[in-house]
Structures are given as C-alpha cells and as structure tokens.
Amino acid sequence: MNVQLATFTLALVLLAAPLTSEAQQTERVYRIGWLSVGSPSGAVDARRAFSEALLQLGYKEGRTLLVEDRFAEGRSDRLRDFAAELVRLKVDVLVSHGTPAGLAAKQATTSIPIVAVGSGDPVGSGLVSSLGRPGGNVTGVSAAYRDIVAKCVELLKDVVPGMSRIGFLGNADNVVNKAHFTHAQAAAGTLGLAMEYFSATKPDEVGRALAAMSRARVQGVIVTADVVITSRQGEIVEFVARVRLPAVYFVDDYVDMGGLMSYGPNRRELFRHAAVYVDKILKGAKPADLPVEQPMKVALAVNLKTARALGLTIPPSVLLRADHVVE
C-alpha cells in the first residue's frame, strides 16, 4: 500500500513539473522607463513610494517588472536623448517626473504609454489636451501647483505682515515654472508686494541664484518643486536659515529638514497613484481614457522651531490650518 502511494505521488510530481516550468518560462516581465531631469539621490522617496505601490499591486521589481532609470542630473538637454533611448528599449510604459521630462517623453513617442507625474500644469504645458480626456498616449498625476501658488504668497504675507518684496526660486527652462511665477506675481500684486524671479537651470546654479536673492534683499521666498531645485534641498534650507529668510516650499520634505513652511501635495502620494495608472495600462487601459489625476489633498506644514529661530510668530489662523507641525 505504501509503495503504491509513493508511486502515485511521484507520478503527480512528474506530471506537475513541466507545467510549473512552463508557467515560470511564460511569466511576463514588464519593462518600465523612468525619466527625470533630477538625480537618483533626489528621487529616493519617489522611487520607493512607486516601487512599494507596485509591490502591493502584485509586481515584484527585478522579477516580474524591471525599471530602466534615466536621470539627467539637472541637465535638461540630456532628456531628449534619454527619452529616445527608453523608446529604443521598447519599454511597456514610460514614467516621467516633472514637466520637462514629460515633454521630452511625449516628443520621443506617440505609441508607448506615458504616465507624467508632478507636472504643475499638464494642459498649459501641452502634455495633454485636457485633464478629463487627455487624448493621445499621455496621462498622469498632476501636482496642480498652479492652483496653490497664490496661497503660498498669502502664507508668507500672513507670517511676515511687513514684507514688501518676495523672491521666487525656480527653473527658467521649465515652462510651467515660469507660468507659476506669473500667477504668483499677480497674487503678490493684489497684496501690494513686489516679486522677482531667480532661476537655476542646473543644480550647480542653485547657489548662485540664492546669493542673487540675498543681494536683492527679498524678505521672503517661494521655493518651487522643480526637480533641479529640489535636488539641492539641503543647500537651500541651510542658506535661508543662515541669512534668516522666511520661505514657503511646494514640497513638504523641506519642513522636516528645517524649512519654515510648505504648502502642496505629498510627492510620495503622487507616485503611489502613478503606480496605479501603470498597473491599469499594463492590464490594457489606454492613456487617452484615463483622466489626469489631481491631488486629493493639499497639505500645510509648519516648523515652529524654525519660526522661533527666525524671530517669527506663526499666527493662530495659520496654525489651525496646518496638517503637520514640527515643534
């Protein structure tokens, strides 16, 4: 009886082995292109959030999914070549971070699906024809900075009521950044404030832009989420602390590093939602049919320790609206 059972079990194992082997051989491995004007170090949180979301959706990076990273290290002129390279690799989906990368990806292909993440104005920049019906091969997750930049101006004015001149730190090569400045400048004008644009188109230009801002004697600064700018977060926070310059940032990471205030969407959430769109596309959805997502929540963060160091009192009206407070 035992011999018969053993023989039967062995037969089942032998029959199952080819099926298992065949399943392993035919398991699809997807290839995702990741295109950014920034650096790997500046994308750690975004990449981690993206990878974790994909894992929760059933993809195992390195096994069922490969990510081809292309970082331009602050050189926008390299984006076109990197985008073309990813197209030649025949990636299944191309994920772009920021408007310049999204535009380079769109220029490189009309057939590979593109998930554009973090653009402040996908329609105004020409990435999509509309948010609800993107059309073409591009969809994504917008950061909607155009809608919040006026609020950043108001926050600075609330915290420093006597200010008259604000700096705007951005990247002149980023068309959306320039549009944001126009909106911010209009908002500043209604409050009786002057605003000046300070640009860094490469990471090593950030220091010069900060120095120019200091010489211009601005009394506050708005720091954008352009990838070139965020690649030098530590340098920016250290500089504005040294010259005692109040700042409001589009990205919340700054506040935990010692920045005064931030107002904007959570970048990690943007990339988690991007992973959901990648999953839908890999399962057959068309980018043209996927509306560009807007941030579900825009959060205000305040660092009270930094406020005290700057000799500022955060008004109760601002603190009551804060979603995150660093004591």
Image (cartoon, rainbow, N blue to C red):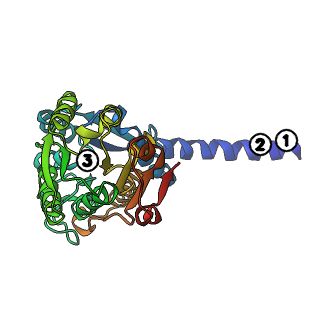
The answer to whether marks 2 and 1 mark residues whose Cβ atoms lie closer than 8 Å is: yes
Lower sequence index among marks 1 and 3: 1
Q: Amino acid at mark 3?
A: Gly
Q: Residues within 10 Å of mark 1 (few under 14, many from 20)?
A: few
The answer to whether marks 3 and 2 mark residues whose Cβ atoms lie closer than 8 Å is: no
The residue singled out by tag 2 in the image is 7
Q: Nearer the viewer, residue 101 or 148?
A: 148
| Residue at point 25%, 39% (across, down) | 229
Q: How far is mark 2 from mark 1, CA to CA?
A: 6 Å
Residue 280, x across and y down, in percent: 36, 61
| Residue at point 19%, 31% (across, down) | 211
Q: Secondary structure at mark 1?
A: helix
Residue 109 appears in the figure: no
Q: Secondary structure at mark 3?
A: loop
Q: Which mark is residue 220?
A: 3
- Which is closer to the viewer, label 3 or label 2? 3
Name the image quarter holding residue 319.
bottom left
The answer to whether marks 1 and 3 mark residues whose Cβ atoms lie closer than 8 Å is: no
| Residue at point 40%, 38% (across, down) | 44
Q: Amino acid at mark 2?
A: Thr
Q: Nearer the viewer, residue 211 or 87?
A: 211
Residue 313, x across and y down, in percent: 42, 53
The residue singled out by tag 1 in the image is 3
Residue 315, x across and y down, in percent: 41, 61
As drawn, is 147 to the left or to the right of 159?
left
From this view, report whether residue 118 is shown above or below residue 322: above
Q: How far is mark 3 from mark 2, CA to CA?
A: 81 Å
Q: How far is mark 1 from mark 3, CA to CA?
A: 85 Å
As drawn, is 275 to the left or to the right of 193?
right
Q: Amino acid at mark 1?
A: Val
Lower sequence index among marks 3 and 2: 2
Q: Residues within 10 Å of mark 3 (few under 14, many from 20)?
A: many
